[in-house]
Image: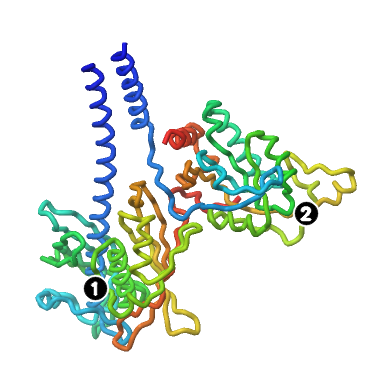
Amino acid sequence: MLNKLITLAFIALLASSNNVVAEDVELPILSGIGGEFSAVDADGEAIEFSDFAGNVVVIAFGYTNCADICPFTLGYLKRLYSELTVDEQQKIKVVFVTIDPEYDTPGHLKDFIGHFNKDFIGLSGSQEQIDYILSLYQARYNKLSILDVPTQNIRRVNPKLFADDDEVKEDKASLYSHSVTLYLIDKEGFTRSLEYTGTPVGDFTGKIRQLINE
Amino acid sequence: MMKSIVLMFLCLVGAVASVSAASTEVEQRVEYTTSLNSMASVVMNWYGSLIVKDTAVSFAETDNRWDEFRSHYPTNISQIKITSSDLTKLDDNYQYQFKVNSLISYNTANGEQGRMFNETFIFYVPLFSLPVIKRVSIDKVEEALVVNGSEFNRSYYKSREFAYSWLAYLDGVDMAPSLSASQWIDKVDYKIKIGNKIIQGPVLSALEQRKQYLAKGGHLLRSIDVKKQQDKESYLLIIIAEWKGVNQDGKSVLAKVRQEIEYKILADNSWQVLSIDEQHLLPDIAPWIGLLC
């Protein structure tokens, strides 16, 4: 009986080892990309990046008034997340960092992110904190116009909530262009791959699984 | 029980083979980059010193046993443009063949002329040692068009000679003579920014700390640029190199290394490095890196 158990255990080990050999892709540590930072989560609580230690993390940058790439990116991440098993979902954090913390308050960010998936994490903070995070990941953004635009004129998936119509009419925000890179980070906090919404979902989930199983 | 032992053995063989393959890959990278960079430095010296002398740029003398061979080149060379090169390791250990095709422009009484040269250098390069030219042959010479502009001059080769020597030095080859390192290596402030980690200090101590992150591997030069500093008597040599290897924990690492090396040219035309500033950038692993939407 003991022999059979040992044999089965080794078969399982060998099978998993073969799987790893067959599917693994090279995911070197990308030197100088990422690091420890502090921010404010969607509940308004201060957090450190190291709070995610032990989880695989996917980080995206954007803002809630983004009419095109951000909803597309979050839709892509929603699909990616749904391809993972429940167990795998518990080992990954999908993090969306706003580049417009002035407009994207923690509460608004929470509503926006929740529209896609309630497990996703929205991070805001002071402009200084956000600019520091962007510098760590070497992500960039540019303001597209000097003047703010009425948000009513922006096609948005999840408009900010206001108490009355006057506030809605007066609401204005800036528009930005920004980096579209998705950063895949391992359980120790090292950036291991750079992806985008053009990455086939199967390839991306494969890399996520590889890091979960490391 | 026998089955278990066989299976355990297979698992272990698989694991060892995988580790061994990664280790071999790093060893090969080290050997390739150190030999390439050190040989390229010698080749840059070879061609740069063929170009007609000016007051601002000097090269170390080429071994005088090549004087007769070098007399086969035209005189009054104004520019040399290397159009292609190919490095091959020969069967004999430590020997490499470096094929170089170039266009040479030179001045004559009848105006500027051009020739194409195909040449082969055979180097002897013991690992981490200075390369020695064993043989050189001119395989083909043809009349050719004159090289446009004035980019491929002595300064062009001097900056590349320095850059290749420096990268070879970073990878462990003692290139101190070709870097004039004794004049500056102990005095220079070397600042390295890797994410939110900053290393700063004299070259040797900074490199020692850098080894935590880039322990074993090699630099491959990707681009080079030289700028005169405004309101200063110094220049900036901007190097971008790709580094691949392992960190001190043996984990695979990829870095896009950007260095700004500030230097001034001394009275004897040698370079004195004043400071080195290094940052690790987003690696160019896909065409959309850096794209904004």
Residue B98, placed above or below residue A92: below
Q: Secondary structure at mark 2?
A: strand
Residue at the spot of label 2: A149
Q: Residues within 10 Å of mark 1 (few under 14, many from 20)?
A: many
Residue at the spot of label 1: B45
Q: Residue furthest top?
A: A1
Q: Amino acid at mark 1?
A: Asn
Q: Secondary structure at mark 1?
A: helix
Q: Residues within 10 Å of mark 2 (few under 14, many from 20)?
A: some
Q: Amino acid at mark 2?
A: Val
Residue located 40% across and 72% down the image: B261
**x, y percentage for residue B258?**
42, 63
Describe residue A54's horizontal placement relative to residue A28 as left or right: right
Residue B226 visible within the image:
no
- How many numbered badges does the structure rendering display? 2
Work out how far the residue at label 1 is from the one at label 2, CA to CA, in angstroms.
59 Å
Identify which residue, A193 or A198, lies in the foreground: A193
